[in-house]
Every structure is written in C-alpha cells, then in structure tokens.
Amino acid sequence: MLTTLFLDLNSYFASAEQQLRPALRGRPVGVVPVMAETTCCIAASYEAKAHGVKTGTRVSEARRLCPAITFVKARPETYVDLHHQVIRAVERCVPVAAIHSIDELHCTLLGREREPERAVELARQIKASIAAHVGEQLRSSIGIAPNRFLAKVGTELEKPDGLVVIERKDLPGKLLGLSLRDLPGIGPRMHQRLQARGVDSVERLCALSEGEMQAIWQSVVGRTWFRWLRGEEVWEPPSRRRSIGHQHVLPPERRTQEGGRGVLVRLISKAATRLRSLGYWARQMTVGVMCLDDRTWHRTVKLPLTQDTMELLGAFGSIWPAHAARVLPGTPLRVSITLHELEASASVAPPLFPGAQKGMQLARTMDAINTKFGRAAVYPGSMHDSRNAAPARIAFKSIPDFDAAG
C-alpha cells in the first residue's frame, strides 16, 4: 500500500537562478556564497554537473572542468521566497505533511490516492502546478512508496524530473542498482561500519536479519531499517531541537579582536531572536573562535533559563575580555555561537521577578518592531558597527525565517 509522496527539487538554487534569469537557461551555472576563486559551489546546474562540477567543487576547479560556467552569488531570501511558492503550488493539489529542507517535502496519501494510478496522476499534477505557478525551470523528482524512507530513495532513482513508484512487490529489486551511500542515513562512518561487517552492497544489506541489523546499528534503529527496506511503515517520534547556533567566517576587514567581538554580538542577537521565534529557552551558551593559524578557543557559560537577548549579551561580556587577552596574538578567522540545553516554552514557567519580566518584554517588543519595519530597525547598541555583518545564509536542512533572523 502506497502511503507517501516525497518531492525533491532538482539542483534547487541553480534552477532558481535559471528560472529568474532566462539568459542562464541551458547553460552551466554554479551558485557560490561569495564571488571569490577560493570559495566552493553550493549548487550546480545539471549542465555544469555534466562536466563534473558538483556541490563542494572549488570555483577554480569548476572553471577548469567547465570553462563556460557562469557563477552567480547566492540569494538566500529569494530562494526562501520561491520555497514558499513551491509549497503553495503543491498544496493546490494535496496538503504538505512535512518540510524536510528547503528543497524537500513529503505528502501523506489518503484513500484512493494510495492506488498507484491515482498516486502517479497526483504527482503529475504537482509537477504541473509548480511549473505553472512558480516556474518551468524548477523541476523535481518525486518518489511514491509505502513509507517515507523508500519514497525519498525513489527520488534518487531518476534525476532530473523523475517520477518513481516503489511498491512492496518491487523490493528489494528496485533498490539493487543503488550504492550503500545512496541510501539516506548512511554516511561515511556508517558505511565503514557496514563494510567492516562484510556488507558492501544494498543487496547484502537487504539480506541481513533484523537481529543482524540491530547489532550493526547498535540500537533499535537497526530494527527500523529492517522494516523500512521491506516497505513497512514505522512510527517516528517528533524530533526535538537540541541547539540553535550561528557561525561566520570574518571578512578580512573584521579579522581583529574588536571585529570578531562585534560579529559575535550580532550572532548572539540573531540566535536569541530565533530562540524566541521557535519557542525555546536556553541553559547554556558556547562561544567559539578559530584563528588563521588553526588555533581554536571555546568557552561555555551556564545561564539561568533564558531567551532574553540582553541577558545573553551580558553573559558573553563576562567571558570575552578573558578570551580576547588569551588569543590576542592570533588573527580570528571564524566565530561561532551556540545556544544549547534547550527547553520548549510549554515546559517553562514565565519569569517571576520584575527585572526578568521587563527584559523579556523588551526583547519581544524589539522582535515585533523588527518584524514590522525590517531586520535591525532596533538593535542593541553594542552591535551598531556590526549590524550588517553575518547576513543570513541557508542551511539545506533549515529554512530561515527572515522576519525573525535578527
């Protein structure tokens, strides 16, 4: 029984640029975070991929592989806007059950939608809706299967613009052309562990018993994989966020102690805004610095359970002077901030003391003003010189809310 339709937008950032810039259509394109020979492609069009350019290819190497390639600087806000347009286009056909990244989502099939012919027709309607309401360059691969895992695997079987149905009767045959690393969830370490057990192909993986899989994964996750590969549905508990963080590579003009401090203040403000937007409170904050000579420094400070920007900045101020003196001989290259030991707002009692209450009221008022009038309409004075530093970036697994980015 088919239960899930999984959609994966093909070469999303590059396809978005080809949609928005008709002159790039049919041409090799590389999307980069900054226009520099030393950076890497964060996306490549299929025309560029045909020459061996892929995500992570250095710009200089991409030019060697594909002399005709055009590089464009990434536009995160534009990609997020298109992402939401895609969601609306899909929902003209069927409700979206979950968004997994900026270029992946899945829908739950119900009733007669679970019949193969109906499911395929629904997938074609979704593709047509995206083409009509967002753009024809935004092609997608769709997998339809008895569970979300196999539906996602289905999107890998035909690219670009694929449509694959995997039924239980097709297993494991339809998977045997894949490598182990093609399966979502098998990274380098898991691949090594499987090979150490003599599992060097998808065929051998599918032949393992439930007990053997549990032993290799060293947890009940092995049992889940056993069921996934046989087309069974597995209940998955809702995920719980464990941390919120930002990092930023300092531009040359900010590679000083004061420049690094300013950017960290900006990152803390952004993280605090996200903390409130997502409905979490933090018990700990970790500040990190990496220098040009590869020396690193990290300091974790415990907090009263908080989501107040000024309280976080106060905690940062208590550790930064000691940090600055310690790494003064070095040149800071990258700075980072992580809020962890998170608690959801539903399980946190509101502040009892007037000072804490005023701090939270101020933070939420600043959020409301910035949402209405634009990011950094109001901000802590300590980030004045760095208010435009560390612009929002897109992590594929996290779609930023630019109204709440701080």
Image (cartoon, rainbow, N blue to C red):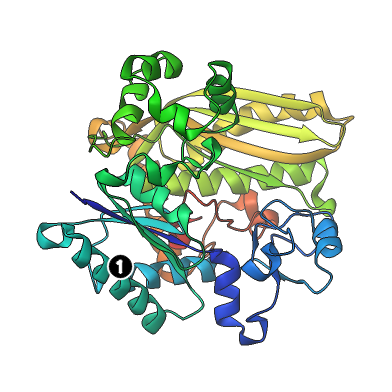
Q: Position of residue 293 (x, y in %)?
A: 87, 32
Q: Secondary structure at mark 1?
A: helix
The amino acid marked with disc number 1 is Ala
Q: Position of residue 164 (x, y in %)?
A: 37, 59
Q: Position of residue 93 (x, y in %)?
A: 23, 72
In this view of the protein, can residue 163 be seen by the observer? yes
Q: Position of residue 325 (x, y in %)?
A: 81, 26
Q: Residue at x 59, y 37 (%)?
A: 337
Q: Residue at x 54, y 47 (%)?
A: 269
Q: Which residue is mark 1?
A: 123
Give 51 or 313, whichever is nearer the viewer: 51
Snapshot quadrant of residue 213:
top left
Q: Residue at x 55, y 34 (%)?
A: 338
Give 174 or 308, whichever is nearer the viewer: 174
Q: Residue furthest bottom?
A: 23
Image vertical order of residue 375 relative to residue 202, above or below: below
